[in-house]
Amino acid sequence: MARRGLVLFFTLGVSLQDWAKAGFLTREAAYFRRLAEHVGPVTFITYGGDEDLVLAEAIHPIRLLNNPERLSPEQFLRRAPALYREVLTEVAIARSNQIKGSEAVLAARILAGAFPVIRGGYLLSRFTTGQRPSLRLRFGLWRYEARLFHRAGHLFLPTAEDAASARRWYALPPRRLTVLPNFIDTDHFRPFPEIAPQPGLIGFVGRFAPQKNLEALIEAAAGMKDVRLRLIGDGPLREPLARLAAEKRIQIEMPGVVPQADLPRLLAECDLFVLPSLYEGLPKALMEAMSMGLPVVATPVHGSERLVCHDQTGYRCDDPSPEAIRRALVTALSQPDRRARVGAAAREAIRAGYSLDSVLAIEVATYRRLGLV
């Protein structure tokens, strides 16, 4: 009997509960249910303990295998392929969800003969450029990725720039690599014409961490008339950001992490969406806002630049400084008619290249070309 099906190894240390808390369990489960229609039964192997089993019904008919002994992430990474070897011998494809933890798919080939596919939401070695790492760290990441990529059967990366970097740095032949973007549920994240945007309300979704550069956004908003911020998410900088906003006399809302079901309507009330990050991969929060037809403001960083064509699908800051962010916000807020056209163009761009259907078609076509389905 021919092998069918796919096992997805979660990112190192990530549980199904983590997906639920981050608000994208429903979105990801929908994608893999659709993928199962083409590749056969899908199984998730997660790092969570018994708490993940509570969510098994939420991902049905996807099978859930967890970390029953609550091993550390590093221990479970090493032991999971052997623990679930019987399952892996039945499937055609072992796929990672990110580069971190993809050693498991390589072990699945050795132990069970499953075809190993590494999917990266970003190149680790390229993503760190925004963090100014030491040469030693950069070299370590290059060596780590080189070892993984040369042993993988196939590699998925989210942008053409990532793919070009991987081919150049690791001498990978083009046939071993496919550009597979992040996807957006464009039916869920859609325009809401019945909801009138609140003038001056600027939205953000993401983790309250240094990468997102939210201090600069608050500094940028200081002194702007009738501007309010709606920062959706959570993270270690929540309290410092609230204090800074109070100091700068900025009206700010922090509703916390919002379920995917409720997020579109909160965004629809915003006049603008802003992502002021210092570095990004291919940011889903930005894509979701664009899918809704929201005019967006983004800093000129990898990932965001791929999505935002200045004055066409959004507004691009000159740099991540408060001054540059303020200029972009002022420009966008002062052009209501242009802003509406930019938002409409942004939605069409996301629908054309980043919808669930378009991304799913790329993944399925790749497996067919490889003879796996």
Image: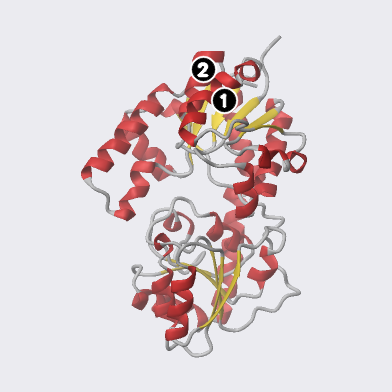
Horizontal side of 125 relative to 292 (left or right) equals left
Q: Residue 280, percent across and down?
A: 43, 54
Horizontal side of 15 relative to 134 (left or right) equals right
Tell me whether circle 2 and circle 1 mark residues in contact (CB < 8 Å). Answer: yes
Quadrant of the image for the C terminus?
top right
Of residues 190 and 4, the one drawn nearer to the viewer in this rendering: 4
Residue lying at 48% horizontally and 30% vertically, measured from the top left: 75
Dot label at residue 364: none
Quadrant of the image for the N terminus?
top right
Q: CA distance from mark 2 to mark 1?
A: 8 Å
Would you say residue 178 is visible in this rendering? Answer: no
Disc 2: which residue: 109
Q: Residue 176, percent across and down?
A: 45, 26
Q: Residue 229, percent across and down?
A: 53, 77
In this rendering, the answer to whether 264 lies above or below 227 is above
User: SS of the residue at dot 2?
Assistant: helix
Q: Amino acid at mark 2?
A: Arg
In this rendering, the answer to whether 19 lies above or below 40 is below
Dot label at residue 94: 1
